[in-house]
Amino acid sequence: MKAQSLSDFWEITEVDAQGLMFAPRRRGFMFEADGLDGSFLATGQLTALHHDWRSILRLAPGEELQIVYRKRVEFSRWIEDQLSQAFMGESPYGKRILLDRLSDQVAHMGEDEPRLLSQKIIVCLWTEEALESEALLEKRALIEAQLTSFGFAVRPLKRDQIDREIHISSQDLSCSERQEAEWPALKLEAGQVKVGGDCFRALELNRLPEGFTELGMIQSLTELPYPMDVCVRLKARDSRPIVSRLEKKRNLLNAQKGSRQAPAAELESQMDQIDQVLRSLADRSEAIFDLSLIVGLRLPPHLAAFQRKALAGMVRAAAKMDFCDLEETTIGTFDSYLECIPGFSGKNLRRHTVLGSNAVHFLPFFRPSKGDRRAVASFQTRGTGLYAIDPVDSRLANYNWLVSGTSGSGKSFFVNSLLAQSSSIDPNIFIVDIGGSYNKLTQFLGGRVMSLEPGQGFELSPFFLAKSSDSKEERLRRQHVFQIFLEMTRVDGQLPAIEVRHLLSEELRALFELDRLPDRPISAVVQSLAKKSSREAQRLSLLLQPWAGQGFFAQFLDNDRVLTSNDRVLTFDLKGLTEFEDLSRVVQLVVCASLWARIRHLGGEKFSWIVLDEVAFSLLKTQPQFVDELVSTLRKYFAGAVVVVQDLEKVTSNLAGSSILQNTQSKAILQQRGDPRNYSEALSLQAVDRWAIESLRRKKGSFSDVFLIRDSDRTVVRHVPSELEYWLSTTAPEDNLELRHSMGEKSGRYQDKILDFVAHRKSGGH
């Protein structure tokens, strides 16, 4: 007898370049679907979603939908990737943050659970019609539109992508997508199939729940932390023969009403059920499906005990939700294995007849997103899984972030963590802040904090950089210096008349041409204006007086100090300037323009962050064109801006607001206050997205929920800071007092003292 291979069970005769599949008496195609994070959906929201989904789930009689939900990637492999990522950074203290966070994550995951990161949903549709390619493509576009209206992204698969998905689904857990495709080595044993180095065992839907079903209950299975395959197959049936049989049965039951052999209560109950189904089919245009459900679990032989435990856990998880009765397969295990491979089908599987309104409850379209392929930074999902972020992923159109949340929602904690975890890519980090939220992280990473307080004697020149030999760069420098001087002349939010601005431009041009700046350049402009008798010169001189000579602001800005810091991590703390609104506004523009020039000068040798925490709002009010220039151009220099604001309405009500929204491909939305329309309209949110934001929670010192928007990916993550991250980020007065008291008693480097303090607290000390 000839030995069979898996290829013998491959019924497809052809897959064309567009991804159309041809088999005897059938035609089909496949999609990859993102799925929906349903962890935040309340009962009423699930009911609304169910109504939408049920109206979309429409198949012609004989059409068949196969949905395979697949989890892969072993926990140990993820640990190895994280370790290698941690050691890529040059800063030893940046590595320490990453390793400390990794240790904290591992501690939360349990000892023997193979926690997984890779999840996929593959949708395969078959039609019994002998459609031509053009008609089949039209049907694929229709199904794609229907699935998209479910609320998640869908991508049709082409021939090589279909081959890859079949390859991954058929192999053992050690298989990589980069591995050359081949049919796996299989060995059939009692109750299991050996797939390469793994043992495959399966559960089958044995009985539908007698009580009720509800949308989202499938999550009780898909959220379990096991390397599983869940296959749901729906085949549409012609409802007319079923309606005819039900009507006949109802007539027979009605005829038995007078019989003593059948209890009246039982007859009434059966007739009520039939009437309810018939009304559903007539009034709501219900569909009828044959449904089968298979759950496969594959693990190496040395985890056999854990596999048994996991199978029992799956059965309990289903039962807990009034979900269904799952039973382990025996002689049908190989058919269950086939069923879990997209495009394949098992034989002799239990099928159950269900209404479309019930069928949608079994769709495994609930899948917390796992984020990017490379985990430069990682955060927890609400289900204690992991979400990976690669801030420099090549697929991103830009590297900018918009972070918004009410006061105390955890914005700076999240940004601190994002910056700290990005240490593995060894970035430049430039921060402009008015709250002191990043000072400790800056010092820990070996950077410099510049505290711009009047009592500190800081000096910054509006001519923040020396002349450049590059004509384009020099032109931009002059433009920014002119903008800074315009800010000095602003009164009650208004700029001076155009004639005054023209005169200012002429005066600055003379300074730009000098080989060496005067020691006090603002005073030099005022002195030059004093020699002119025009009204414009008098007006401009009056406006610049506070910034020149003996004016209060002159001590900070009327100098020729050029910003020459070469620190890779640099924070400007402007909180001391908040009571001097005019000075703060001008200094913010000087600092931001100088950092923008620094990034351009670096030329993209390394990735650079520039963080504008609440500073961006001030700049937006007065210099929207500068903010627009910054966020729309940074990517060219391998850099990203992190714009942090409390209220999104501050962004949307500004001239440059649309530019910020369009040029921040990554958005982190924390708890919001006020009218939901203020943020939902600005971000073009669907109902499901609004529900996600409304569900966000936080617990001081413990966690903050974040709704992440990264291109088409939208999910809720929970930022749980490690002990070290917490003490580097906290601005609570009592925390900082405790930290200063502990560190003040010891000698040594700042970093070592904080590490000792954290280690002492972890060991139970106070």
Image: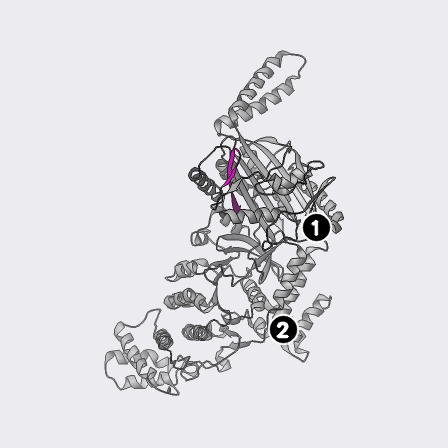
- Give the amino acid at mark 2: Pro
Decide which of 565, 175 is in the foreground and name it. Answer: 175
The C terminus - image quarter: bottom right
The N terminus - image quarter: top right
Q: Main secondary structure of the magenta part?
A: strand
Quick check: 183 left or right of 406? right
The residue to which callout 1 is attached is 197
Q: Secondary structure at mark 2?
A: helix
Q: Position of residue 511 (x, y in %)?
A: 33, 83
Quick check: 243 left or right of 260? left
Identify whether 281 is placed above or below 656. above
Queried whether the magenta region covers residue 30, the answer comes back as: yes
Q: Which residue is most to the left?
A: 534
Q: Nearer the viewer, mark 2 or mark 1?
A: 1
Q: Position of residue 5 (x, y in %)?
A: 65, 42
Label 1 Cα neighbours within 10 Å, binned few <14 / some 14-19 / many ≥20? some
